[in-house]
Image (cartoon, helix red, strand yellow):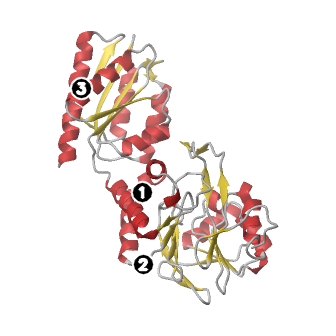
């Protein structure tokens, strides 16, 4: 190792070094709050044909190049493999290619098209498809296309000699940490961040994820390490089995006995109704999770919803519309396409109730299975109104418990 480099590679197996970058300060990714930052993982395979697996986001070019140079002269790299063309993995690919001057850059057929459209320059791109192998001399890479997980170009690469599956965005999370392996990090943190990543990035593509997961498992690969492009790496049969099981659960979206009650409020009317609905949910034996969108980020709401059986939405009326925080969060949720949700609607209005109709439109777009007619009150709810809210919560809770038990 060249100790004169400011950033050092980390060896993860006999032939493979981690040469990525840690983004401690990333605040947001695609509208998703990344409160713990992220990593951009790239890997250097020291085989007869030295190969770089993925690159990093453009601002981190020098950090990655330094890590590479701590192991080998970058110009000795023969190949680059691009498993995913999104800019957080390929942003510095042209600059790296100019410095390294590899013989070839490999990507899926869709990846070749995407990289060409991104950079509009000659990159010596070669397309590989499912089943193709790249001979590295004393090792080989096997490629499997995983289209729409989560872009059309996505693929994974398996290094047979070391039992490493380079899985690009699959099985990853946004978590900045110097602890390279999952077993060096707190399991509760891994659980939440894996759920959050799937809910906010991968959820719309769950049917494709299920098929790809089954295909990878059917290959019966002798996996030693599962190496995603974000977050810690999974090593050993126990941890690899754990994250595979989480993905099976995420794909299924089987209803739980939890009900998310998402609302915002102006003068506390909707807040009072939300709390009364939560009382009813609890009486029915379900678990209420009350989230004020005044203080809950849309991406945290999406994570909670993915792990729920019910979603109850409430809003005040502002300028003949629902409250802006509701419009923001529901537009975001609609794009993620959560499934299997029992629902209900509530809110308050003043001199017109047009916003309440807008809330009903969102319920249709989210395919919420409503248990009853929406409960809308004029101005401030009375005790009788709040008792109706309790009853609505009980209806949702009973249905969620029933579906969870099926």
Whether the residues at callouts 2 and 3 have beta carbons within 8 Å, the answer is: no
Q: Nearer the viewer, residue 307 or 148?
A: 307
| Relative side of 137 to 5, left or right | left
Distance (Cα) linking label 1 and label 2: 24 Å
From this view, report whether residue 173 is shown above or below residue 350: below
Q: Are marks 1 and 3 in contact (CB under 8 Å)?
A: no
**The N terminus, quarter of image:** bottom right
Q: Quadrant of residue 345?
A: top left
x and y percent of residue 286 in the render? 24, 35
Q: Which residue is mark 1?
A: 205
Q: Residues within 10 Å of mark 2 (few under 14, many from 20)?
A: few
What SS does tag 1 mark? helix
Q: Earlier in the sequence, mark 1 or mark 3?
A: 1
Considering only order in the chain, which callout, 2 or 1, is on the residue closer to the N terminus?
A: 1
Numbered label attached to residue 221: 2
Q: Is residue 367 above or below residue 350?
A: below
- Image check: 389 left or right of 103? left
Is residue 78 visible in the rendered image? The answer is yes
Image height of 143 relative to 19, above or below? below
Report the Cα–Cα distance between label 1 and label 3.
Answer: 34 Å
Where is mark 3, residue-wise?
280
Q: Identify the residue shown where x is 38% and y is 15%.
A: 269
């Amino acid at each position: 190792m060249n100790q004169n480099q400011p950033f050092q590679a980390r060896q993860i197996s006999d032939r493979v070094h981690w040469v990525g970058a840690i983004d401690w300060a990333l605040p947001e990714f695609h509208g998703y709050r990344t409160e713990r930052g992220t990593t951009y993982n790239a890997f250097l395979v020291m085989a007869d044909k030295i190969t770089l697996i993925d690159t990093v986001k453009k601002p981190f070019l020098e950090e990655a190049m330094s890590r590479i140079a701590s192991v080998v002269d970058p110009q000795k790299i023969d190949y680059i493999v691009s498993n995913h063309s999104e800019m957080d993995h390929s942003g510095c690919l042209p600059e790296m290619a100019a410095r390294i001057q590899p013989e070839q850059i490999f990507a899926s057929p869709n990846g070749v098209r995407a990289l060409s459209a991104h950079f509009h320059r000659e990159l010596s791109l070669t397309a590989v498809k499912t089943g193709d192998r790249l001979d590295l001399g004393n090792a080989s890479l096997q490629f499997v296309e995983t289209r729409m997980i989560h872009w059309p170009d996505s693929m994974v690469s398996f290094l047979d000699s070391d039992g490493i599956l380079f899985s690009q965005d699959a099985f990853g999370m946004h978590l900045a940490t110097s602890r390279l392996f999952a077993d060096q990090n707190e399991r509760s943190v891994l659980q939440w961040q894996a759920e959050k990543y799937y809910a906010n990035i991968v959820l719309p593509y769950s049917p494709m994820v299920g098929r790809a997961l089954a295909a990878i498992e059917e290959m019966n690969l002798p996996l030693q390490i599962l190496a995603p492009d974000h977050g810690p790496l999974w090593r050993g049969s126990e941890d690899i089995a754990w994250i595979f099981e989480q993905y099976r659960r995420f794909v299924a979206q089987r209803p739980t006995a939890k009900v998310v009650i998402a609302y915002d409020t102006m003068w506390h009317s909707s807040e009072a109704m939300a709390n009364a609905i939560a009382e009813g949910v609890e009486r029915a034996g379900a678990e209420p999770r009350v989230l004020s969108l005044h203080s809950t980020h849309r991406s945290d709401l999406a994570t909670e919803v993915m792990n729920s059986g019910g979603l109850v939405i409430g809003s005040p009326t502002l300028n003949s519309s629902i409250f802006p925080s509701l419009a923001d969060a529901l537009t975001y949720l609609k794009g993620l396409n959560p499934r299997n949700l029992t629902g209900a609607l509530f809110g308050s209005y003043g001199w017109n109730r047009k916003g309440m109709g807008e809330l009903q439109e969102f319920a249709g777009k989210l395919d919420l299975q409503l248990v009853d007619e929406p409960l809308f009150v004029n101005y401030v709810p009375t005790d009788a109104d709040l008792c109706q809210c309790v009853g609505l919560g009980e209806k949702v809770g009973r249905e969620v418990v029933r579906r969870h038990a099926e």
